[in-house]
Amino acid sequence: MDIIEMIRVAFSSIAGNKLRSALTMLGVLIGVSSVILLVSITTGFKEFLISQFSGMGTNLLIVNPGRTETRRHGGPGLAGVRDLTIDDVNALKKRATAIEGTTPLIVGTAEVKYLSRARKVAVLGVDEEFTNVINMQVFTGRFFSKEDASSARRVCTIGQTVKDELFGNENPLGKFIKIGTSRYRIIGLMEKKGTILGTEDLDDLVIIPVISAQRLFNTEALFGIRSKARSRFVIEEAKRQITEIIKKKHGNKEDFTVITQQAMLSTLDSILKGLSTTLAGIAAISLLVGGIGIMNIMLVSVRERTKEIGIRKAVGAKKRDILYQFLVESIILSLLGGITGIMLAFVGTVITSMLVPQIPPLLSLWSVLLATVFSILVGVFFGVYPAYKAAQLHPIEALRYE
């Protein structure tokens, strides 16, 4: 019997027991669709995170006060932490050759008023290099200059949300708003950025010179420092230079932490991979159940078709012909379940994209191919024993079977 005839007979047998075959394929269908859908959602979420972090600037290095990494010897060194200051920023600008730009950062919340309208918003204190370091550009007007920053002029730029809430359709440029108890002139409107990670509205903020922010919040300490490496190839060198320069400024104490975007993304990637592996393992249980179902139904099929096997052997069919026949039937059952699962996964990604358009799943070719191969292997693995049992039947005993 050639392979074409084996496939024809297999489909004939499957069609003759439609409900039983459908229930047999259900486990494989659920397992395959679950694996593909989970991989697609995880891949889509990973791309979303990368785009979110990249949206804040490329080759970004984040310097935070306090040591958050465990040291090789001794404790984490949290005692006697020294604040980051403007002097640290100036030292980086002068000495760090691998850095293209550096800006101090102060973050706080204050009430912002315009005429009778007021709202609590985030206030950032930065210097003139902010737009070079962080990927936030001015939509109209201008950002403040080096002179504005160094002389603490009371000028500011605002986000689109602040503009809409306080000014509506009115042009805010040149207008004065009150931040806390001081009046600031609006010199720029920032481009719309939306939210980061779906929570923080980057348009609901006011940006003022860093010295003005220090006076507003009555602090000399910086929330942090943000630097931009000259290219992605010198990020580690930039990190080393930042560490050495600030460490020297702090009396040879490493009481701060330098984080790169790659490190953050690497950590997130590890978490997502662990989550994907766990979820895929759970989905694989469905494939295991489906495989056991295939084995069970094939054993039943062998018993039901014992006389047929005896007749085939009596007219010259060899053991391998019987073996291949039942193995092909098992593979086809598994493959049909896998193909249906792939189609269901595709529908699932479309529905998920409609429900969560911000984080659309990414259906990858490798996950589809892997699921297809896996479904075939399930058919082979769980079909071997029933096929072997059928092939070992003695023709005379098979013919006598009732």
Image (tube, rainbow, N blue to C red):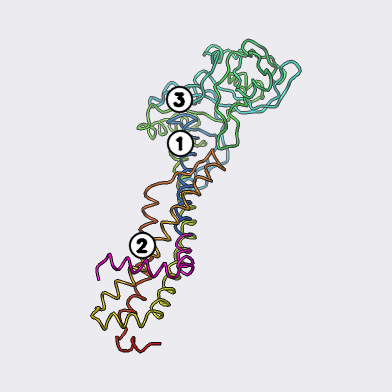
> Which amino acid type is shown beneath numbered disc 2?
Ile
Judging from the image, what secondary structure is the residue with disc 1 in?
A: helix
In this view, which residue lies farthest toward the right?
Answer: 116
Question: What residue sits right under mark 2 in the picture?
Answer: 376
> Which amino acid type is shown beneath numbered disc 3?
Leu
> Which amino acid type is shown beneath numbered disc 1?
Gln
Residue 318's spot in the image, x, y percent?
24, 78
Mark 1 and mark 2 residues within 8 Å of each other at the beta carbon: no
Question: What residue sits right under mark 3 in the picture?
Answer: 92
User: Badge 1 local density, few (<14 within 10 Å), some, or many (20+)?
Assistant: some
Q: CA distance from mark 3 to mark 1?
A: 19 Å
Which quadrant is the N terminus positioned in?
A: bottom left
Relative to 177, say whether 279 is above or below.
Answer: below
- Give the mark, 2 or 3, whose residue is nearer the N terminus: 3
- Along the line of sight, the residue nearer the viewer: 71 or 24: 24
Residue 285 in view here: no
Q: Which mark is residue 261?
A: 1
Residue 131's spot in the image, x, y percent?
50, 21
**Residue 22 colored in magenta in the image:** yes
- Along the line of sight, the residue nearer the viewer: 203 or 59: 203
Residue 310 in view here: yes
Q: Which secondary structure class fits the magenta region best?
A: helix
Residue 248's spot in the image, x, y percent?
46, 30
- Give the mark, 3 or 1, whose residue is nearer the N terminus: 3
Q: Residue at x 33, y 89 (%)?
A: 397
Relative to 132, say whether 308 is above or below.
Answer: below
Q: Which residues are magenta?
A: 1-29
Which quadrant is the C terminus positioned in?
A: bottom left
